[in-house]
């Protein structure tokens, strides 16, 4: 069991890895990055439509809110 707790759905972290490595034209780093992340997590929580809708509403209601903050698991009150 890992001692770290992620505050974002891990699926979103995988998406960031894909976007970041692809935009830098470093696609050869995608597999190792995925493997590293999978080595330290216990469970992958999906990003659901409901979560996306809540994040959208938070960002629209609070102009100073960062989109990534609005998408955190804490924003949804989840206790995983």
Image (tube, helix red, strand yellow):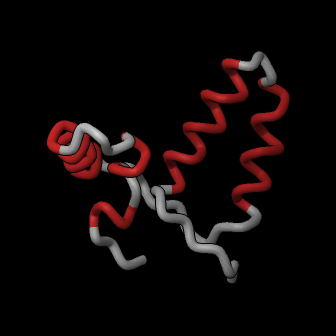
Horizontal relation, residue 66 to residue 56: left or right? right
Residue closest to the far front? 64
Q: At 78% across and 24% down in the image, what residue appears?
A: 27
Q: At 51% across and 49% down in the image, what residue appears?
A: 11
Say if 77 sits above or below 25 in the image: below
Horizontal relation, residue 70 to residue 30: left or right? left
**Image quadrant assignment for residue 63:** top left
Give percent across and percent down for residue 28. 84, 28
Horizontal relation, residue 6 to residue 17: left or right? left
Image quarter hosting the N terminus:
bottom right
Circle count: 0
Give percent across and percent down for residue 36. 79, 55
Q: At 15% across and 43% down in the image, what residue appears?
A: 61
Say if 39 sits above or below 28 in the image: below
Give percent across and percent down for residue 80. 42, 77
**Image quadrant assignment for residue 43:** bottom right
Say if 40 sits above or below 57 in the image: below
Q: At 77% across and 45% down in the image, what residue appears?
A: 33
**Image quadrant assignment for residue 19:** top right
User: Between residues 38 and 63, which one lies in front from this camera angle?
Assistant: 63
Horizontal relation, residue 78 to residue 37: left or right? left
């Amino acid at each position: 069991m890992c001692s770290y707790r992620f505050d974002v759905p891990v699926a979103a972290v995988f998406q960031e890895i894909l976007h970041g490595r692809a935009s830098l034209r470093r696609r050869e780093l995608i597999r190792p990055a995925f493997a590293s992340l999978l080595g330290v997590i216990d469970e992958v929580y999906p990003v659901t439509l409901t979560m996306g809708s809540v994040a959208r509403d938070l960002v629209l209601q609070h102009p100073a809110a960062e989109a990534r903050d609005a998408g955190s698991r804490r924003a949804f009150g989840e206790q995983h």
